[in-house]
Image (cartoon, grey):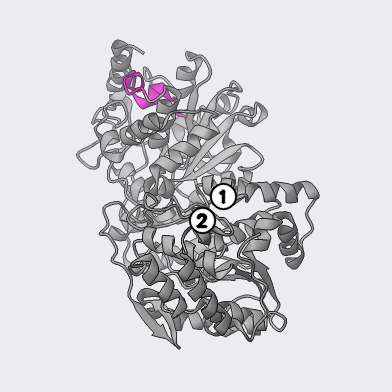
Amino acid sequence: MSENEELSYSAAIQEASKSICRFPLIPVEGIPLRSSIANNFDAISAFCPDSSDLLIATYPKAGTTWTQEIVDLLLHNGDAEACRRAPTPVRSPFLEICYPPPIPSGLELLSKMAPPRIIKTHLPFQLVPAGFWEKKCKAIYVARNAKDNVVSYYHFDRMNMTQPEPGPWEGYIHKFMRGDLPWGSWYDHVKGYWEERDKRNILYIFYEDMKENPRREVERIMRYLDLSLSDDIITRIVELTSFTAMKENPMANYTCVPTRVYDRSISAFMRKGEVGDWKNHFTPEQSAEFDADYQRQMKQADIPFRTDVMSDKQTVIPRSLLVPIEGILLEDHIAEGLEAVSAFSPHPSDLLVVAYPKSGSTWTLEIIDLLLHNGDVESCRRAPITVRTTFLESTVRLRSKSGLDQLKELDPPRVIKTHLPFQLIPVGFREKKCKTIYVARNPKDTLVSFYYFHHMNKTCPEPGTWDDFVRKFMRDELPWGSWYDHVKGFWEERHKRNILYLFYEDMKENPRREVERIMKFLDLSLSDDVISRIVELTTFKNMKENPMANYTFLPNEIYDQSVSKFIRKGEVGDWKNHFTAEQAAEFDEDYKKKMKQVNIPFKTEF
């Protein structure tokens, strides 16, 4: 689009600005919409898209403009100039928007564009024109946590002179909770698309994930659009869509809208773009009331929202110190919270997955999640593994919520991971007779993997040299204590405590057999085709490439995957590339001494 056409769009808004007012709300099928939209809704509802059109849907102020810019750059191979051909609302029309003439409505702009078109909407799922689903159009939905969303919407309503008067902050929160704002209930909005995401080919993404790891989410969108761009182009797109670059981009920052309509002396259209800014607005009382209402309205939904993420600007976290608890060495931040962990009361339907570190926990958790979701890959890519399953003893040192806080927000049955030895497991798991899966890996390969993990995990204690680390392992001086006591503790209790005891080596040798064992233990019955799909989805190669399982969602300040990948080799027998003949002999002698009273069938090679 030419510069003159771009200016004519701005000029049209300027010309109509005297007719602009804070439009009242009129309900459409129970959803409050601005009167200018409600009065034209028959035409909006009748819109017939082309099957190649892409719909970008969000609740207002949830990351719409950001996503529109990412998509436009992906479709133009990262060409910044091509994506500055016109303002965002011209390049990617707002389906339902209607303003006084001569401002073109969304429908008018779309009528002049040839497919494929990028179409924005804030309509809840039930009000989206049926043609989008009949034509099987692709749709991207962006969801933002409720607290940051309400803060951003409040400031937007203050500066946007077409929105109803927001009133004071205290009252605005209650309007949000009641669903009395334009485009209705945030709760129903995010749930509506979540529930339809699998049936309707909807890519459901989270604003917080985009902030935490923008490259990963750009790549997800790229794959969804069946595109393949080079790493350099993806890097450029990530840079061009950073908050700073977007805020300074006149084709994306809505400076095309005159101050009479968007009063930027009150608030910028792109204000902060932070995760967790809600903490600067909610009082403790407001937060408590909001949280209680959230629990009530979202209790039937399992949508993994986060109200905080690890920021690139945060200070590098120092390596942990080790503290003994009942003779077991634990990282200091975990030791501090262990009393609360010990008091945790599970539900009888909860599933506990236990392993000594680097023994196959993530692999097993992914298998379980796929089994519980009938092999549906999209369901199991709904969120990172740390959100889909809960690490019982984890703390806020590395995550936005502790494991215990995360569990409070989830309804049973829950999949709960732990590295705690048997004697430190909360007694509630035994009292409630919860099912437990234990994964054991031979000590030599476990040691090698744990060594590399210590190098890449910048919060673990300093590993020292390889020789030092071998001796720490043999002396039980690593986090979570003695490998020997760990594997023996669960082995000795496996028959009394409803524990399925698995071996990493068996999972590598015959993954289908072990997947079927887990399935039967969980009292599930899946078809052969679904089992085959699960085995394929959880191969080492697929796990390593799965951004929801490979821990690339954690920043490099925590997991520096340039040092070593979280999912590194996954081989049985890799220890031979690390142990000297003398180390292996000394290790074997120590193993025989510590394990002579127990007959656990470990394999160190096939």
Query: x%, y% of residue 490?
Result: 62, 79
Separation (CA) of disc 2 from disc 1: 21 Å
Q: Residue at x 67, y 68 (%)?
A: 502
As helix, strand or loop, the secondary structure at mark 2 comes to loop
Q: Residue furthest bottom?
A: 326
Amino acid type at circle 2 is Pro
User: Around disc 2, counting alpha carbons within 10 Å, would you say few (fewer than 14), some (14 to 19), or many (20 or more)?
Assistant: some
Task: Say which quadrant the N terminus sits in.
Answer: top left
Could you tell me if residue 99 is visible in this image? no
Which residue does the numbered mark 2 point to in the structure image?
A: 304
What residue span does the magenta drawing correspond to? 79-97
Q: Earlier in the sequence, mark 2 or mark 1?
A: 2
Which residue does the numbered mark 1 point to in the structure image?
A: 543
Q: Main secondary structure of the magenta part?
A: loop
Query: x%, y% of residue 161?
Result: 31, 36
Is 108 magenta? The answer is no
User: Compared to 55, does 215 lie above or below?
Assistant: below
As helix, strand or loop, the secondary structure at mark 1 comes to helix
Task: Determine whether label 2 and label 1 are within 8 Å by CB.
Answer: no
Amino acid type at circle 1 is Met
